[in-house]
Image: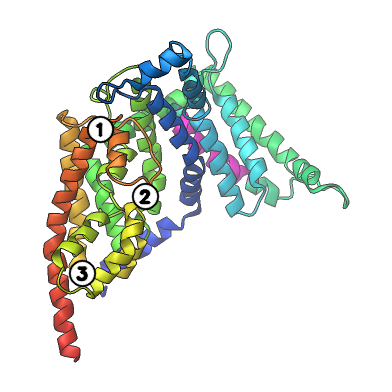
Amino acid sequence: MDNKMMQKFIEIAGRIGSQRHLIAIRDGFVAIMPLIIVGSLAILVNNFPPFGSFNFVEWMNTIFGEGNWQTVGGSIWNGTFAVLALLVTFAIAYNLAKSYEVDGLAAGIIATSGFIMLVPFTEDGGLNIGWLGTQGLFVGIILALIVTELFRILISSNMKIKMPEGVPDGVARSFEALIPTVIILIILGFFQALMNVFANISIFEVIFNILQEPLQGLGNTLPAAMLVSFLNHLLWFFGLHGTNIIGSVIEPVYLPLIEENLNLFKDGMSAFDVPNIVTKPFLDSFVFMGGSGTTIALLIAIFIAIQKEKNHPYRQVAKLSAPAGIFNINEPVIFGLPIVLNPVMLIPFILVPVTLTITSYIALATGLVPRTVAILPWTTPPILSGYLVTGGSWRGIALQIVNLVIAVGMYIPFIMAGARTMKRNGEKSS
């Protein structure tokens, strides 16, 4: 901790973690996560694979008719993943405006309206709904940030209509937002006109080709996945919430990848054949089992390595942390063992997830295990999550078990070393 470079790293990471625009992006994705999960599970149910001799899809078809019951899941998809960028635009603008203590609802509505203005039309005059989903994600993020900043500046410059006292709050707020709304939408209208005249291409296509597509291609590689895993756990080791800090960066990259897998799975493609390996469910289900650091393996390692001393501090922490750890909640063990700033645990806490990222990538890339085709609540326990994210395959469970065995084996020597260090320190103090 005396190292100046490390202190600087912690300071920079802390600033990044508290940067209001990144927080707004993170909170925007968190706000719509229930919709993402529901949409994902709807498609999983619609395309659930046979279990032994029982075929769920055929059974439902015999009851409700061929494909009729799948309309429910398809409708849920249309209201969630199909308009994901639109939802994210509103949520980010709302959260950013609230951080400035200006009208979040007005900012969200203006940003959403602006997003619709920029969406290109189809040949028959309708909106090209393909850009409302994950393909338009980066445009939605950028637009939400710019529109909210403009809205804040205009409001703080008193470019608003003040209503007399006694007017209902809702009416007063809507009139306050009137002038900023007019100015912002006119600016966006001129921008769209200029794009049509001089570029003859939509901003969605420009951003997708220049920024989003290359980032998605890079994100779907093993080195990128290892880097994400490494940085996440390095930040956690210093007591910084690594998941939150890097979440605003990786969500826009990894959500379109899982959405592409889901779309193809929905259309009948096997989970073995979908294109993308590295997705958020890939990390959550096969690497972050028990939470960051694969700490469910750490708890198992403690129970294996320390059996005789029933009241050992490590065992006590493990007993208290185990119920939450099953559901991937690991703050009790991270801060209770502790892992944070504990030099004995630094190496395994970072090395285990990076190793599991490699083993999982190889397993999916070689076709031993199906690729991820569902997004689950992050509290879904291991084993169940491995089965569901791979479209109902036992191979997903097998990979989780193999990874847990590897992780437990890597953690045990460090648990024993930590216990010996604790014992020596206790003897010296006595």
Q: Separation of disc 2 and disc 1 at Cα?
A: 19 Å
Question: What separation in Å lies between label 1 and label 3 (alpha carbons)?
Answer: 33 Å
Task: Indicate which disc, 1 or 3, sits on the residue closer to the N terminus.
Answer: 1
The dot on residue 246 is 2
- The residue under label 2 is which amino acid type? Ile
Residue drawn at x 13%, y 56% as measured from the top left: 410
Q: Is residue 340 visible?
A: no
Q: Position of residue 363 (x, y in %)?
A: 16, 35
Check whether the beta carbons of the residues at disc 1 and disc 3 lie within 8 A of each other. Answer: no
Give how far across and how far down residue 207 sits, in percent: 43, 29
Q: Is residue 326 above or below residue 109?
A: below
CA gap between label 2 and label 3 equals: 23 Å
SS state under label 1: loop
Task: Determine whether 330 is above or below 136 in the image.
Answer: below
Q: Quadrant of the N terminus?
A: bottom left
- Residue 343 circle label: 3
Looking at the rendered image, the disc whose residue lies closer to the viewer, 2 or 1, is: 1
Quarter of the image where one finds residue 100: bottom right
**Residue 243: percent from the left, percent from the top?**
36, 52
Secondary element under disc 3, as helix, strand or loop, is helix
Residue pointed to by mark 1: 277
Residue 195 falls left or right of residue 414: right
Q: Is residue 390 visible?
A: yes
Q: Which residues are magenta?
A: 136-151
